[in-house]
Amino acid sequence: MKGLILAGGSGTRLRPFTYSQPKHLLPVGGKPIIDYGIEALAAAGIREIGVVVGVETDGPLRQHLADGSRYGVEIDYVFQPKPRGLAHAVMCAEQFLAGEPFFMFLGDNLLQDPLADIVRAFNNTERGSVIALKEVPNPSDYGVAQLDERGAVVRLVEKPTHPPSSLAVVGAYAFVPEIVDACKKVLPSNRGELEITDAIQLLIDDDRPVFPHRLRGWWKDTGKAEHLLQANQCVLDELKGTVEGEAENCELSGAVYIAWRPPGAVCGARTGVRGARRACSGQPPGALRLVGRRFARGGLLYPAQHPHGGGASEPAVRTVPFHRGQVRKGRGKGPRGVRIPPPGR
């Protein structure tokens, strides 16, 4: 099975953030959104991944993802000249897909459930596709699925005024190869796009089964600013704090991540450390010592070697909004803060 990540949209609903970069590179939990999709497909055992890019996203995504080797996958790029809908993106990727089954994932979506569960459900079917569904309170804002008494999908409607159910179609699909031909038969919708829901409906009408996979965890479509903030909080809530050092006369509270500062990294003046005295300046590479009454109040600190951080060429620490991680002043005398030894000591 191949993977297909759709990342051709310009992200107009996320202006002004997307004036300078694609929405798929906006950080959630200190990591670009698209990285979660790539890593989730890799964890599901999918090694060949095609990334559909558009005019505005082509260059930045190629630069960020490269050949995919750092994710343990092989990435090919599929160019979509205009964002004419999800079915059109599948048609653009026909050569890459080469008649094989594939897993399609929207590059601006985040799922708590592992994609491996959907792949497993697909492998257990006989020539049937599997689509992820999530019960939502506002189904009229999404594509909606209707199930029969056996639990199979019998009808899909895109953003209906009177939804037949509360099951929204999530941006994760495991498709049989026949979906490509179905996409070619789709006519433009009222929005002027070739809808993937119409292509799936053609499969159903052609007696090709489509099975639902109901998500248990959260699902976030980060197409709007408020959803991006919600996704950020969901991801951060799952992070666990780590302190690779010794606390001196202070109290660590919440999911604080403090670790080794790699040699050569330069700590910038704005590190998100509040109430601290000269948290990084004057320290040699690696000898990061965090001092002050409060550290990262309202934020998580990420050193550059944290899995959600960057490389040594970036600032040594990064912060993302969080409401619990902090360091409180202790009652004893002497220096306070966290001393972080070099790795291996």
Image (cartoon, rainbow, N blue to C red):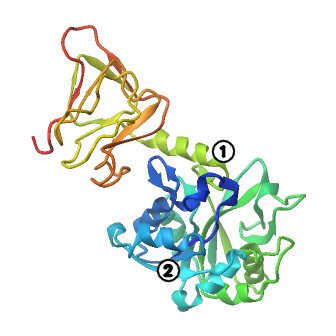
> Quick one: SS at disc 1?
helix
Q: Tell which of 54 and 160 is nearer to you.
A: 54
Spot occupied by residue 62 in the image (x, y as percentages of width and height): 45, 73
Decide if residue 251 is in sight here: yes
Residue at 77% in and 62% down: 144
**Within 10 angstroms of label 2, few (less than 14), some, or many (20 or more) residues?**
some
Image check: 221 left or right of 115?
A: right
Residue at 70% in and 79% down: 87
Q: Amino acid at mark 1?
A: Glu
Disc 1 marks which residue? Answer: 226
Residue at 70% in and 56% down: 13
Q: Is residue 54 above or below residue 322?
A: below
Q: Earlier in the sequence, mark 2 or mark 1?
A: 2
Disc 2 marks which residue? Answer: 77
Spot occupied by residue 175 in the image (x, y as percentages of width and height): 60, 78
Residue at 62% in and 54% down: 222
